[in-house]
């Protein structure tokens, strides 16, 4: 039983050393992100108390977890099929898109999650390489400018969240 779990958690092995390195990094990053996200979400819900969190917070938490889970599932399934490059690009793009959604739905550049773009850029640098990192950094800057303009025009409104909500929706 434990060997099956270890085999499932282990990245696939390829003939190419670069593919092995990318698969290992993608496996470590994606599993680590899921574990940390699960722990933080659980602590947030337990700390805030289930009765103190409204439906809006649950919907917000579910949408975040859904987007991050989608990036994990797509990357892992592509990687297990032997499509390492596609898996790395898919993970970086879907993770970045989840951060875009997160900042967009929480007030733009003033949102606490805006700094998460840096995490997506670093992950892209590790998995995809220089070209993907530069493209993702450029897109992040563009999104930041668009959100800043929309905030200044009153389209995106920053919403202050309470401590309970803050821990629940990280």
Image (cartoon, rainbow, N blue to C red):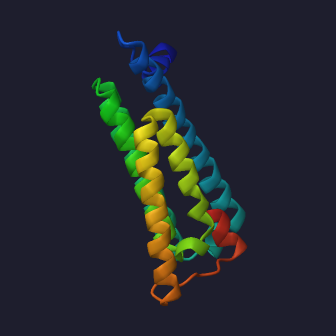
Q: Residue at x 42, y 35 (%)?
A: 128
- Along the viewing direction, whichever of 20 and 131 lies nearer the viewer: 131
Q: Position of residue 10 (x, y in %)?
A: 47, 20
Question: Is any atom of residue 43 visible in this view?
Answer: yes
Q: Quadrant of residue 88?
A: top left
State the image quarter where residue 101 is shown.
Answer: bottom left
Picture quadrant where residue 167 is located? bottom right
Residue 97, image x and y in percent?
40, 57
Give percent across and percent down for residue 38: 57, 48
Give the side of residue 64 with respect to residue 164, left or right.
left
* Residue 2 percent location from the top left of the image: 51, 17
Identity of the residue drawn at 65% across and 75% down: 52
Disc count in the image?
A: 0
Q: In which quarter of the image is the C terminus?
A: bottom right
Q: Residue furthest bottom?
A: 154
Residue 153 lies, with reference to residue 86, above or below; the image says below
The residue that appears at 27% across and 26% down in the rendered structure is: 81
- In depth, the one of 92 and 133 nearer the eye is 133
Q: In this view of the protein, can residue 95 be seen by the observer?
A: no
Q: Which residue is drawn at 39% across and 50% down?
A: 94
| In the foreground, 24 or 85 | 85
Above or below residue 31? Residue 46 is below
């Amino acid at each position: 039983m434990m060997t099956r779990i270890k085999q499932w958690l282990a990245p696939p092995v390829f003939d190419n050393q670069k593919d092995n390195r990318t698969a290992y990094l993608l496996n470590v990053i994606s599993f680590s992100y899921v574990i940390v996200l699960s722990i933080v979400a659980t602590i947030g819900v337990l700390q805030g108390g289930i009765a103190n969190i409204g439906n809006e917070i649950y919907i917000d938490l579910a949408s975040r977890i859904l987007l991050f889970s989608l990036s994990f599932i797509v990357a892992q399934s592509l990687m297990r099929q032997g499509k390492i490059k596609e898996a790395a690009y898919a993970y970086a793009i879907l993770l970045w898109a989840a951060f875009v959604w997160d900042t967009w739905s929480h007030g733009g550049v003033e949102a606490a999650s805006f700094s998460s773009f840096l995490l997506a850029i670093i992950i892209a640098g590790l998995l995809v390489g220089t070209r993907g990192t530069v493209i993702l950094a450029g897109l992040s800057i563009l999104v930041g400018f668009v959100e800043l303009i929309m905030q200044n025009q009153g389209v995106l409104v920053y919403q202050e969240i309470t401590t309970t909500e803050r821990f629940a929706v990280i």
